[in-house]
Image (cartoon, rainbow, N blue to C red):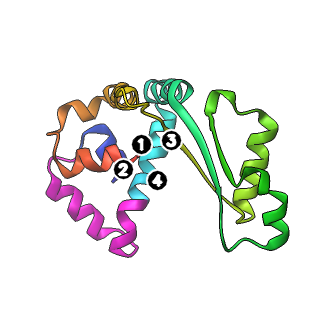
Amino acid sequence: LAASLWRGGLPSDAALESGLRAARCAPSESEQHLIYALAELVSLDEGARNAADGAFARRGVVRAKALPKAEPADAAVFAHYAAYEMPLSRVRPHVWLALHRGSERGALKLNVVLEDGGNGAAAAALGSVERSISVLGALPPGSKRATVLRKVFS
């Protein structure tokens, strides 16, 4: 289903809905699985990958916050990152590893987002990624197919 959507082989939103219903998992999970599969296809597409890398290099922000249900020992170890925010381009490798370890241990919630800065720069960066995905240009903007493709980047 993901490959058909990526190649533009789904002729309608009804075909997408039919494919989601035919998935071998709960309907609430089928769209999320499709988004994961599409994210993998984006990572394999050199143009889309380069556009996404560029967007996050320019506008990416790493945010971490402490999770209230963390083990006390882990909470103490990662207390320094309890309210962390830094442009992705400035995060040192050892800090990234610590943030990731804190996330894996359940002490931190870690996000990497595109920061807008109030000037529409994040939207422009996402637009460049979307333009690199040729099938999006052929889909009606409000269609379910276009919406699912765009969720890969949100």
Badge 4 or badge 1: first in the primary sequence: 4
- Helix or strand or loop: what does disc 1 sit on? loop
Badge 3 or badge 2: first in the primary sequence: 2
The residues tagged by marks 4 and 1 sit, at their Cα atoms, a distance apart of 11 Å
At x 73%, y 50%, the residue is: 81
Query: Can you say whether 127 is above or below 144 in the image?
Result: above
Mark 2 surroundings within 10 Å by alpha-carbon count, few (fewer than 14), some (14 through 19), many (20 or more): many
Residue annotated with mark 1: 153
- Helix or strand or loop: what does disc 4 sit on? helix
Amino acid type at image mark 4:
Tyr
Give the magenta range: 10-32
Left or right of residue 41, residue 143 in this image: left
Kindly identify which numbered label has been placed on residue 113: 3
Which quadrant of the figure has residue 107? bottom right
The residues tagged by marks 3 and 1 sit, at their Cα atoms, a distance apart of 10 Å
Mark 1 surroundings within 10 Å by alpha-carbon count, few (fewer than 14), some (14 through 19), many (20 or more): some
Mark 3 surroundings within 10 Å by alpha-carbon count, few (fewer than 14), some (14 through 19), many (20 or more): some
Amino acid type at image mark 1:
Phe
Badge 4 or badge 2: first in the primary sequence: 2
Residue annotated with mark 4: 36
Q: Magenta includes 21?
A: yes
Badge 1 or badge 2: first in the primary sequence: 2
Closer to the camera in the image, 21 or 81: 81
Closer to the camera in the image, 28 or 8: 28
Left or right of residue 148, residue 104 in this image: right
3 and 2 marks in contact (CB < 8 Å): no
The residues tagged by marks 4 and 2 sit, at their Cα atoms, a distance apart of 9 Å
| Quadrant that contains the N terminus | bottom left
Residue annotated with mark 2: 2
Amino acid type at image mark 3:
Val
